[in-house]
Image (cartoon, rainbow, N blue to C red):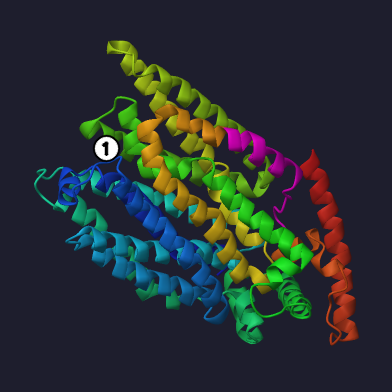
Amino acid sequence: MGLLFNVVLAVFAATGSFLFGYDSGVMAIVIQSPHFLKFFDTDTTSSVIGAVNATFSGGAFFGSFMGGFTMDSLGRRKTIMIGAIINLIGALLQCTAQHLAMILVGRILAGWAVGLMSMSVPVYQSECAHPKTRGLIVGLAQQMIGVGFIVSTWVGYGASKVPPTNSFSWRFPLAFQCFPCLVIICGIMFFPESPRYLVETDRADEAMRVLRKLHYDGSNDEWLETEFNEIKLTIDAERAITAPGWRVMFTVPAWRTRLMHATLVQVFTQMTGINVIGYYGTIMYKNLGITGDRNLLVTSIYNVVGPIFNFVFIVFFLDRVGRKKPLLFGTIAISIALVCEAAIGSQIPGATGSRRDALSGAGVFFLFLVSCVFSVSFGPISWVYASEILPLSIRGRGSAFATGVGNWLVGTVWSQVSPIALGDITYKFYFVFVAFNLCVTLPTIWFVFKETKQLTLEEIDLLFGDRALGTLPDNLDDKQREIELERISEARKKLAGTNVTAVH
């Protein structure tokens, strides 16, 4: 079936990423509902609203770590399905909430589920992808996150048209989460398990059948055989130094380095400030003088722009330009946009008439620009790089740690702090992200990150020196060892060529 089936699999699995985007974006609309604010006796910049979003991120933090266990014990598909079941329960609690505790518990469960799916979906996609299209395949996770944001805001915008006394304005957007949950629960078991997980669990024949289903184009039998042997030999090599538990990720030097890469790319993604805009864009637009129905409309349009840029980038550019260059571009461009946004925000309070309107329009432009730049840099690449950089033996636990700490723990802090900061120090808050981007993110990506475009997951092992350190198990026969050493030599030549290209 080849590429078409691979794309269909990736899009379906990314329904879990859709839930990530929808659950993250829906509260930005819900907290604008007068009935919601009155029902729970709060306002948009209160600590209660911060807690509603922080419990979601906090739940996702623990959900990510749960994925570290279920990915290894139950597999990639079942982890995604478990996430959908938990999300369904959380959605039902939220849309039927009679008091704040139900909302908070529902948000914790939804976050727990999204944490599970945010780390398992990219890994599942990455392990099923062809190396030449892995950027596209895993980039679909970010695409569906964006689509989730779009649907959440337009569903919320439509629901807001009811009278202010009607709870439909916030109950229906929260109830809509149930639909993608049911799609995943009913459909995920019709798709195959990751071939690498199948080999790891001693189901080699099934793994070969899945590889053919994913990548066979009618004439590439030799490549499929080579890919299968790479996977099997890599797993055999890793088993020689793998120990049970989580400690091994920190004790094997090369694995510790790779875990650091996966975690940092998630931290840097959060430090662009993109989720602060996603969660609290309505407050930012209010600070720019955009209120009422116009505020919701601008928020809805904002969420459409990013996915358009993301789609063009992952289809036409990501697997050509690689990972590092877009990340460097994104760091610098987002920092410039946020500085401009802060400069405009500083002028809004004293402006009136047409000048105020012009400043408001410019402020909206730079927030939109952040989304566009993010969508051609950190948005898709954070998931691609984090999922491909980890070795198979710790991929489940490593992805859990990287996503849980790098994405959700950092996100939890900003979810709680941001509404208060945006209310108290307004535009000055942006400089926190600018300073971090320029002083930490930029030099780290430049000097530390590695280029991984179009390498197989097994060749990425060699990029970090894992299997060049004498870790091949003793029980490999002479023929296997000869094949492996020959493949290592060829891969080193390929890596040398890749690194030269990356420098230029």
Magenta-colored stretch includes residue 453: yes
Q: Quadrant of the N terminus?
A: bottom right
**Total number of numbered discs in the rendering:** 1
Q: Position of residue 447 (x, y in %)?
A: 76, 43
- Residue extent of the magenta highlight: 435-455
For numbered disc 1, what is the local secondary structure?
Answer: helix
- Residue hosting label 1: 296
**Which corner quadrant of the image does residue 257 belong to?**
bottom right
Q: Is residue 65 above or below residue 264?
A: below
Q: Is residue 276 above or below residue 465?
A: above
Of the pair 431 and 356, the residue shown nearer to us: 431
Q: Mark 1 Cα within 10 Å, few/some/many (few <14, many 20+)?
A: many
**Which corner quadrant of the image does residue 180 belong to?**
bottom left
- Amino acid type, residue under disc 1 in the picture: Leu
Q: Judge whether residue 396 can be spotted in this image.
A: yes
Of the pair 420 and 368, the residue shown nearer to us: 420
Q: Is residue 420 above or below residue 384?
A: above
